[in-house]
Amino acid sequence: MKFSPNELDTQHVYKLLSGSVVPRPIAWVSTISTDGLLNLAPYSFFTVASRNPPMLCISVGPGVGEREGTVKDTLENIRSTQEFVINISSTPLGNEVQKSAENFPSDIDEFAEAGLTPMNSEKVKAKRVKEAPIQMECKLNQIIKLGSDHLIIGEMVFYHIQEDYYKEEYKVDLDQLRPLGRLANVFSEGKHFFSLPDEHLK
């Protein structure tokens, strides 16, 4: 089988890419609007961008479904406030991660919809997910427009980890963390899978 990207629909190319670049970690991104509205959404186009200073990056696509043609709240909030938090989920929170991925209107609080607890951060105004084992506060470094998407790069300015997930010498206990990953259109960890409809892909 051979494919030329310029001869395929964007969604078909996306499916090939997302089914090939696996597993991908999940960035559970929490932001706040200039009006104080909370937002929370998972993104699987996510990785470390720099070690020194520590930087993380996520790629945010355009709105989909009923919000097609709009800018996602995550991108709009980060543009406006220059801040965000990347929360790292664990397998027991899979249903909450999936719930926060739904296409809610901008005035809906995904924390409340998913039954999660917002916590104050140390260095940024965006709230952390209390239930998440790890939370990384970030200040915006830059946003790069890449085709249909936006690459958001943020410097990690504060790091939180629940004690049960921390090992000596600054190591994370991955057996305890049981992090969620992304395999095409499902969240996965070991034998645990959480379906995510195509229209919610981020």
Image (cartoon, rainbow, N blue to C red):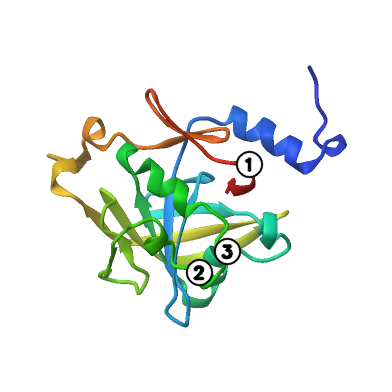
Q: Name the residue that disc number 2 marks.
A: 78
Do the residues under discs 2 and 1 have CB atoms within 8 angstroms? no
Residue 109 falls left or right of residue 116: right
Q: Residue at x 59, y 48 (%)?
A: 200
x and y, in percent, of residue 60 in the image: 59, 55
Residue 196 falls left or right of residue 123: right
Q: CA distance from mark 3 to mark 1?
A: 25 Å
Do the residues under discs 3 and 2 have CB atoms within 8 angstroms? yes
Foreground: 174 or 11? 11
For the residue labelled by badge 3, is the local secondary structure a helix, a strand or a loop? strand
Dot 2 crowding, Cα within 10 Å, few <14, some 14–19, many 20+: many
Q: CA distance from mark 2 to mark 1?
A: 24 Å
x and y, in percent, of residue 2 in the image: 80, 21
For the residue labelled by badge 1, is the local secondary structure a helix, a strand or a loop? helix
Determine which of the numbered discs, if any, sits on residue 25 in the image: none
Which callout, 2 or 1, points to the residue nearer the camera?
Answer: 1
Q: Name the residue that disc number 3 marks.
A: 143
Which one is earlier in the sequence, the residue at label 3 or at label 1?
3
Q: Name the residue that disc number 1 marks.
A: 198
Which callout, 3 or 2, points to the residue nearer the camera?
Answer: 2
Foreground: 103 or 9? 103
Residue type, label 1: Asp
Q: Residue at x 42, y 48 (%)?
A: 97
Q: Is residue 55 visible?
A: yes
For the residue labelled by badge 2, is the local secondary structure a helix, a strand or a loop? helix
Foreground: 52 or 124? 124
Q: CA distance from mark 3 to mark 2?
A: 9 Å
Residue 117 falls left or right of residue 101: left
Residue type, label 2: Ile
Hey, which quadrant is residue 110 in on the image?
bottom left
x and y, in percent, of residue 56 in the image: 43, 53
Dot 3 crowding, Cα within 10 Å, few <14, some 14–19, many 20+: some
